[in-house]
Amino acid sequence: MIESCWSVYIIRCGDGSLYTGIATDVERRFVEHLSQGPKAAKYLRGRLPLEIVYRKEIGSRSEASKEELRIKRMGVKGKLGLVNGS
């Protein structure tokens, strides 16, 4: 079985907050978030406009989940450092 390549991504919301998630297809997942429908993350509903500000291919789902957790624990300054490339 061939494993899909997972990515971690950060979305900036209309209110300035940052949302971190993982997906095998970031563009498809972003469209789901934009739809504000049942497949959208609850956190993102009502926080339009949305913008992908960071993405990184990781590999396995396990590795992507670990990276997502690491990023979520960074706090705003750390996340903004990633987004700004510092």
Image (spheres, rainbow, N blue to C red):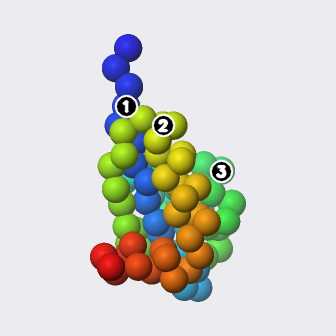
Image position, residue 60 (x, y; %): 42, 35
Q: Residues within 10 Å of mark 3 (few under 14, many from 20)?
A: few
Numbered disc 1: secondary structure = loop
Numbered disc 2: secondary structure = helix
Q: Is residue 55 left or right of residue 40?
A: left
The answer to whether residue 36 is above or below residue 3 is below
User: Which quadrant of the structure image shows residue 83?
Assistant: bottom left
Amino acid of disc 3: Pro
Near-viewer residue (76 or 19): 76
**Which residue has dot 3 on it?**
38
**Which residue has dot 2 on it?**
61
Image position, residue 84 (x, y; %): 34, 80
**Which residue has dot 1 on it?**
4
Amino acid of disc 2: Arg
Instruction: Please tell me which residue is depicted at 47% across the width and 69% down the height of the picture.
Output: 11
Q: CA distance from mark 1 to mark 3?
A: 24 Å
Q: Residues within 10 Å of mark 1 (few under 14, many from 20)?
A: few
Q: CA distance from mark 3 to mark 2?
A: 22 Å
